[in-house]
Amino acid sequence: MELKKNPKANVGRNSSLYFAVGLNVMLLLTYLGLEHKTYETEATKIDILMIDDLMDEDIPITTIDVMPPPPPPQQQAVSEVITIVEDVEDVEESVIQSTEIGQDDIIDDREVGVEDVEVVEVEEDVEVPFAVIERVPQFPGCTGNNKELRACFERKIQEHLQKNFRYPDAAADLSIQGKVFVFFLIDKNGKVSKVKSRGPDKLLETEAERIINLLPKMEPGRQRDRNVGVPYSIPINFKLQTQ
């Protein structure tokens, strides 16, 4: 005997619909629970009372008296006076003559003799090295031949350096030391010029140039019976003494 099942008695036929409805209800309850806000009633009442007190407060009205600006100064009207002057003077036009030479101009053909030409001799500044000059510059107080004058010159230079040497205070504070090479020229008049230096620091270079500029005037060096400039260089050693 075959059993017949009633389709209305099937409980699981609408399970998907019930699941979807239940899921939506849970989501709605979860959303409402998260978005629900609560406030303290006492704090709200206090804020309302404070706002009422501020609204009831009377703010005094302050009146500021501002003086009106002074009236602008009256400008005097300047009436222009036009004077008509009759032009009765004749103006002479200046004629500008051309300085260019044309084809019809005659060129002055004259001969110039050699005796009419003036020759000006320009004396050149000749420099001869100290080692090869015929007669070295004569330092004040030095005498003798060229060899003796050379030795005396070098000795006097050393004495001058020792006498006028002064260590710069700024360089001593910074412990700056080293050798400075000084180059200068004893010109044809016996004066010291073109002083240049090269060293480890500008402070030492300035002091070395100051010492050389204190050199006295000398008798200039001579080459072929004429005064010439003599370049010279000397090293100055700046060294701090350690205790």
Image (cartoon, helix red, strand yellow):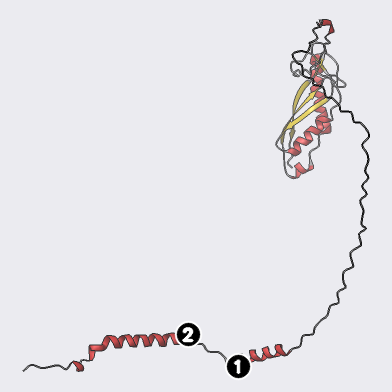
Q: CA distance from mark 1 to mark 2?
A: 22 Å
In the image, which disc is placed on residue 42? 1
For label 1, count other residues whose C-alpha is less than 10 Å away and answer few (under 14), some (14-19) or many (20+). Answer: few
In the image, which disc is placed on residue 35? 2
Residue 151 appears at what percent x and percent y? Answer: 79, 19
Q: Earlier in the sequence, mark 1 or mark 2?
A: 2
Q: Amino acid at mark 1?
A: Glu
Q: Quadrant of the C terminus?
A: top right
Q: Is residue 215 left or right of residue 236?
A: right
Picture residue at 93% right of the left edge, 39% below the top: 86
Residue 60 appears at what percent x and percent y? Answer: 79, 85
User: What SS does tag 2 mark?
Assistant: helix
Q: Amino acid at mark 2?
A: Glu
Q: Is residue 243 left or right of residue 76?
A: left
Q: Quadrant of the N terminus?
A: bottom left
Q: Quadrant of residue 176?
A: top right
Point out the frontmost of discs 1 and 2. Answer: 2
Residue 122 appears at what percent x and percent y? Answer: 81, 15
Picture residue at 43% right of the left edge, 85% below the top: 31
Q: Is residue 10 left or right of residue 195?
A: left
